[in-house]
Amino acid sequence: MDSNLFSVDYFKSALQLQISKNNGRMTPNQTLNSYYHTVVSAIIQDRINKNFELIRRIRNLDTAYNAVKKEVQLQAQEQQQQ
């Protein structure tokens, strides 16, 4: 696992943590969307002079978001089949 700040693994772990923290209060998709929006807003507000770094962070967040969202959808499908 890549533990570098703003890596895909970092964001996947953070997304999964948020899902577990908000279990019962928000659906997993609501939690994913809320976290995504909050982090993108924070990244954009960050005064980063290097555009590449900003793009890398958002790309990693997007990759992690899509991976965790797919996992959540698969889990929901498995639960429906039971």
Image: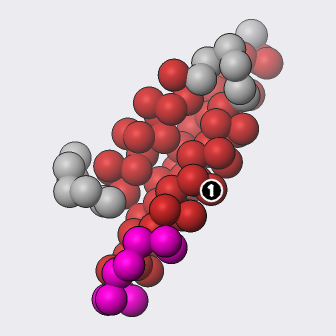
Identified at 32% across, 89% down, the residue is 50
- By secondary structure, the bulk of the magenta-drawn segment is best described as loop
Left or right side of 57 for 32:
right
Left or right side of 55 for 37:
right
Identified at 33% across, 50% down, the residue is 9
Q: Nearer the viewer, residue 7 or 69?
A: 7
Residue 63 at what x, y percent from top left?
A: 49, 61
Q: Residues within 10 Å of mark 1 (few under 14, many from 20)?
A: few
Give the quarter of the image for residue 51.
bottom left
In the displayed structure, would residue 80 be above or below residue 40?
Answer: above
Identified at 74% across, 10% down, the residue is 82
The residue range painted magenta reads 44-51
Indicate yes or no whether the magenta region holds residue 10.
no
Residue 31 at what x, y percent from top left?
A: 64, 37
Residue 40 at what x, y percent from top left?
A: 54, 64
Q: Nearer the viewer, residue 26 or 28?
A: 26
